Image (spheres, helix red, strand yellow):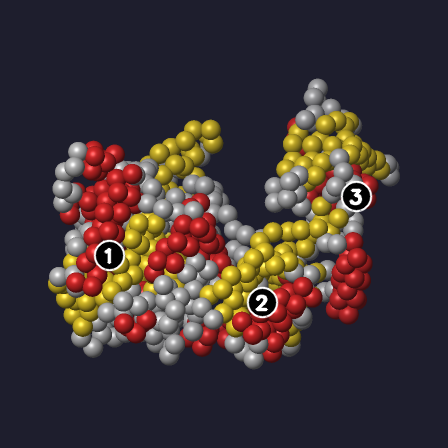
């Protein structure tokens, strides 16, 4: 069976945005206008096709990314709709890793919001070309020009409007296409009737000015168009479209469009822009991988069906009907149903039992998946998020997906023995699906501790445990994921010698330990010379060091951002062993923790609060009472927008407190920003409460 759609007509796109900007509403309109669905799904009444989880329909938000495929103008568009809430940022991260283009949706009233900045940075990290869609132009306070200015100021982008809105708020009637200089309006009960006509006289001057600016801005970023522009040639539509496409794919510019998805206006031109300006798999550079067995050799693979297979697993789902589903993107080659492949990340061979094309939570069996396509597979038992799947004879390894570290934990206790029996399976399956969800057993308290990205994240996890796995559990209050680090450089020695008759134990290492910059993580280096420690024992020293770093000297929290080098040591021909050197490494590191000036670190959150003017002072005062720092404030209509930072520990229950403070009229969003040193006056309070929690749990 041959490929249905030529590769140059394939688009792999993600829809990304801040929560409530209208991502899923845009996606639902895309599905309707492309004929993929025959009714308009809505998030507010729980009928959105892409929000299929019970929790999504109840809360009216997207929690997990959902994939589907649609057709538009003889193009195949593979779409991933992603969450906008910061607690589920993992879904955006892994989706952008495998996509070729993005549609970034902005709320035309709020403009660029905190999570807008986060998803933009994620797209930058993977060099994903994107189009901006300024949504909600029918709402009171909508301002297209202000949103474009915020894209420049806050995102550092080069936005180039390809449209102007005709009117705003209740007067928003359609858009002016600046490329073809025409007016586009939308009629019919569901906006399915697209009419093209002359630009109304009231908008002609603004349209001419905007068209000139569009050509000038694109020419600045495209040499071919610049030549025509400087020579004074008339720029025709086809030439301009090609130049916009080149500049978009190179990330030199970002096209901006306008609409009101809920009112069914502006989505069909957005689809036109997706196929006209965003890249196909053959427009993006070849993907780099490392040859297995020779990590220094880089292998480049273009999106070609006849090349060896190279694919990346980016999501694992426990489906109640078909079992374990692995979503993957094929970068080169072809995967066929029943075929055996190499999981080069795990060093295991896997077999695709079935191949599926997904549409939210429904599925269609297919026989092949070609280069540049996204699909799901059944039968991959040992494949996890970030694993490379490749040809058996020419194995390669793609760069893994990096995920943020959880910042909040809660203890859970199964209510009955049956719940206890089911808990292990639930934890395993949920952690396979979500790399930002961690589980550990606290031996000191005898409790299971789960960690995640925020209160909502863990709330959803506990709810899924109850609904999907029938595990009822008592849930403790949230605990902050504190960390420790060192402030001094020092040299320490770990020596483990034991003689009890027969073969003894001997391990001896000298370590140099130094603090690293915040966020730099842990590094380990072997700087021994002359065989003072045999090479086979160095990994054991590292394991011992890491074992000690799991529990700091100040309050027992994990130690981060330290550099450790083993520089010397000694061994015994008979008595030395891996366990002896592991113990010596741990002993040496414990000394460093005791003497290295340990300090406590806490997660600090970035907050944005939108409050009516009359409550502005109260909200500022409340932020100060939470050890928060106001970074800035600006008016937005009759409200004020406050940017602030505050320790995570001081934000628990903030939604309830803010509602009470402002009679329910204020809103806020929050995301992790960085770890910072805990003030000395607070440290004792934290260590005491941690000890009390453990004692109570025990």
Name the image quarter holding residue 488.
Answer: top right
Mark 2 Cα shell of 10 Å, populated few (<14), some (14-19), many (≥20)? some
Name the image quarter holding residue 327.
Answer: bottom left
Give the residue pinned by disc 3. 597
Residue 206, numbered circle: 1
Q: What x and y, as percent, mark residue 570?
A: 77, 27
Q: Which label lies toward us, 3 or 1?
A: 1
Q: Which label lies toward us, 2 or 1?
A: 1
**Does label 3 or label 1 sit earlier along the sequence?**
1
Q: What x and y, as percent, mark residue 22?
A: 37, 66
With respect to residue 79, does 540 lie above or below?
Answer: above
Query: Residue 354 or 272: which is nearer the viewer?
Result: 272
Name the image quarter holding residue 605.
Answer: bottom right
**Does label 2 or label 1 sit earlier along the sequence?**
1
**Does label 2 or label 3 sit earlier along the sequence?**
2
Residue found at x 61% / y 41%: 520
Position of 21 compared to 28: left or right?
right
> Total marks drawn?
3
With respect to residue 273, does 304 lie above or below?
Answer: above
Q: CA distance from mark 2 to mark 3?
A: 32 Å
Mark 3 Cα shell of 10 Å, populated few (<14), some (14-19), many (≥20)? some
Q: CA distance from mark 2 to mark 1?
A: 47 Å
With respect to residue 59, does 295 lie above or below?
Answer: above
Q: What x and y, as percent, mark residue 248?
A: 30, 45
Query: Residue 640 or 404: which is nearer the viewer?
Result: 640
Describe the element under mark 3 as helix, strand or loop: loop
Give the residue pinned by disc 2. 455
Describe the element under mark 2 as helix, strand or loop: helix
Q: Are marks 2 and 1 in contact (CB under 8 Å)?
A: no
Position of 164 compared to 426: left or right?
left
Residue 397, can we see it? yes
Q: What x and y, as percent, mark residue 233?
A: 14, 38
């Amino acid at each position: 069976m041959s490929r249905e759609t030529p590769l140059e007509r394939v688009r792999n796109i993600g829809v990304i945005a801040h929560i409530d900007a209208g991502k899923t509403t845009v996606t639902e309109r895309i599905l309707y206008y492309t004929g993929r669905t025959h009714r308009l799904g809505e998030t507010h009444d729980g009928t959105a096709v892409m929000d299929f989880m019970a929790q999504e329909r109840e809360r009216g938000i997207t929690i997990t990314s959902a994939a589907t495929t649609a057709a538009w103008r003889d193009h195949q568009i593979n779409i991933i709709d992603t969450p906008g809430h910061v607690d589920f940022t993992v879904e955006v991260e892994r989706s952008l890793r495998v996509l070729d283009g993005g549609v970034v949706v902005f709320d035309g009233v709020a403009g660029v919001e905190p999570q807008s900045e986060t998803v933009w940075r994620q797209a930058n990290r993977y060099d994903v070309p994107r189009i901006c869609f300024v949504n909600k132009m029918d709402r009171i306070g909508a301002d297209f020009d202000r949103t474009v200015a915020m894209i420049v100021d806050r995102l550092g982008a080069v936005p180039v409007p390809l449209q102007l809105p005709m009117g705003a708020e209740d007067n928003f009637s359609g858009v002016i296409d600046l490329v073809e200089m025409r007016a586009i309006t939308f009629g019919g009960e569901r906006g399915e009737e697209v009419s093209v006509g002359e630009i109304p006289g009231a908008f002609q001057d603004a349209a001419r000015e905007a068209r000139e600016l569009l050509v000038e801005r694109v020419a600045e970023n495209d040499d071919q168009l610049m030549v025509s522009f400087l020579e004074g040639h008339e720029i025709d539509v086809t030439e301009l479209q090609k130049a916009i496409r080149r500049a978009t794919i190179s990330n030199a510019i970002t096209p901006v469009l306008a609409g009101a998805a809920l009112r069914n206006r502006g989505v069909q031109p957005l689809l036109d822009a997706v196929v006209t300006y965003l890249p196909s798999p053959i427009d993006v550079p070849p993907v780099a991988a490392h040859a297995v067995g020779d990590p220094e050799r880089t292998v480049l693979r273009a999106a070609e069906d006849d090349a060896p297979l190279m694919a990346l697993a980016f999501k694992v789902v426990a489906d109640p009907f078909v079992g374990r589903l692995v979503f993957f993107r094929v970068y080169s080659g072809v995967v066929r149903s029943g075929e055996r492949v190499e999981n080069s990340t795990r060093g295991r061979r896997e077999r695709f039992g079935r191949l599926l094309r997904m549409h939210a939570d429904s599925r269609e069996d297919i026989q092949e998946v070609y280069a540049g396509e996204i699909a799901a597979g059944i039968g991959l038992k040992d494949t996890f998020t970030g694993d490379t799947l490749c040809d058996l004879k020419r194995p390669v390894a793609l760069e893994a997906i990096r995920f943020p570290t959880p910042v909040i934990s809660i203890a859970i206790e199964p209510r009955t023995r049956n719940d206890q029996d089911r808990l292990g399976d639930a934890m395993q399956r949920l952690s396979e699906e979500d790399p930002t969800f961690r589980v550990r057993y606290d031996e000191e308290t005898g409790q299971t501790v789960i960690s995640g990205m925020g209160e909502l994240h863990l709330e959803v996890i506990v709810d899924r445990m109850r609904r999907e796995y029938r595990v009822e559990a008592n849930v403790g209050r949230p605990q902050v994921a504190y960390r420790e680090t060192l402030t001094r450089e020092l040299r320490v020695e770990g020596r483990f010698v034991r003689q009890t008759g027969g073969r003894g134990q001997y391990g001896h290492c000298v370590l140099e330990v130094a603090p690293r910059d915040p966020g730099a993580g842990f590094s380990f280096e072997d700087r021994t010379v002359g065989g003072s420690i045999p090479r086979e024992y160095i990994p054991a020293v590292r394991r011992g060091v890491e074992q000690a770093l799991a529990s700091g000297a100040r309050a027992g929290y994990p130690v981060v951002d330290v550099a450790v080098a083993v520089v010397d040591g000694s061994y015994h021909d008979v008595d030395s062993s891996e366990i002896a050197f592991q113990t010596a490494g741990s002993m040496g590191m414990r000394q460093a923790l005791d003497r290295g000036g340990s300090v406590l670190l806490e997660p600090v959150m970035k907050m944005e609060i939108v409050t009516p003017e009359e409550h502005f002072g109260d909200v500022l005062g409340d932020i100060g009472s939470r050890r928060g720092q106001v970074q800035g404030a600006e008016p937005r209509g009759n409200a004020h927008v406050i940017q602030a930072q505050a320790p995570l520990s001081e934000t628990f229950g903030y939604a309830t407190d803010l509602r009470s403070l402002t009679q329910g009229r204020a809103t806020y969003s929050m995301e992790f920003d960085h770890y910072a040193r805990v003030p000395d006056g607070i440290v004792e309070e934290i260590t005491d409460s941690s000890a009390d929690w453990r004692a109570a749990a025990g």
